Amino acid sequence: MSQSNSAAAAGTVVVGDRRVNRLGFGAMRLTGPDIWGEPADREAAKAVLRRALDLGVNFVDTADSYGPEVSERLIAEALYPYPPDLVIATKGGLVRPRPAAWDADGRPAHLRRAVEGSLRRLRLERIDLYQLHAVDPRVPLEESVGALADLQAEGKIRHIGVSNVSAAELARAQRVAPIVAVQNRYNLTDRASEDVLAICARDGLTFIPWFPLAAGPLAAPGGPLARIAAEQRATPAQVALAWLLHHSPAMLPIPGTARRDHLEENVAAAALRLDAAQLAALDRL
């Protein structure tokens, strides 16, 4: 397999009406420490983005809170003008008054400003997938999603997604507007969103797991993930990604990194084929 289509090895998934390869790239880690400020080497960060596209990645996920705003600007600087098959997803609804803070703000007025800002930084006329980053407990979810529906009607958003939601919250959002994707924390050691994943698979929504590589002691020497990695002549991270891809056809992992070698390692996981016994062992963890 040539490196130019490595990300395509796991097949494709449809995000709304855009078909993308099932291994994307999360651009959160391209910023400074603690997802705050500029990276130490801007050119290296942009080179990672370009390399992702070289490897066949055509789904890039970011948010206005990464930096804040730094990740979106880097994407535009590195990749604009964008290839026609590239889908850029971004998020709004979290604000960063200081490095350690991630505060929800789902007010319609804030979300409108957030969308306008993302359009400007990404140099887009319309955002392919705009996701509500988190539910704001002070604002009815229907109002937040309704604001995104209004922006969709204005042509500024192509498709709407939600993030960090329960099954009940997803259902509430779906009553307001068509939802095409859910981005929740999900990995081998945290499957609390299994019910949401099942809904996505049933209803044709894309499920985007964030923090997909968390494996903890499973990846330690002698651990079950490490043993399977040795059998596959792969890394534990690659096995963790391969398990996600095997686990559900709705899955669109977006592992993120600021390093080219880690990027290439992650994308190579798309070609990893786990056998039935290995999958069963991982499912039981």
Image (cartoon, rainbow, N blue to C red):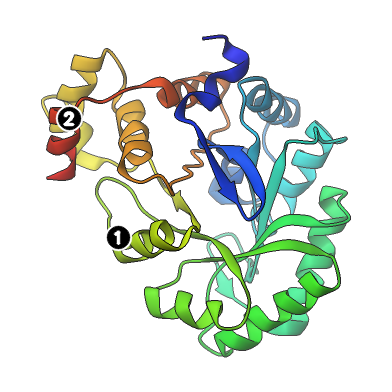
Q: Residue furthest top?
A: 2
- Which quarter shows the C terminus? top left
Q: Secondary structure at mark 1?
A: helix
Mark drawn on residue 194: 1
Q: Residue 110 versus residue 131: which sits nearer the camera?
A: 131
Q: Quadrant of residue 106?
A: bottom right
- Mark 2–mark 1 Cα distance, whole angstroms, equals 20 Å
Residue 8 seen in this snapshot:
yes
Q: Position of residue 206 (x, y in %)?
A: 50, 54
Q: Secondary structure at mark 2?
A: helix
Q: Nearer the viewer, mark 2 or mark 1?
A: 2
Q: Residue 39 versus residue 249: which sits nearer the camera?
A: 249
Q: Is residue 126 left or right of residue 142?
A: right
Q: Which residue is mark 2?
A: 276
- Three-letter code, disc 1: Glu
The mark that comes first in sequence, 2 or 1, is 1
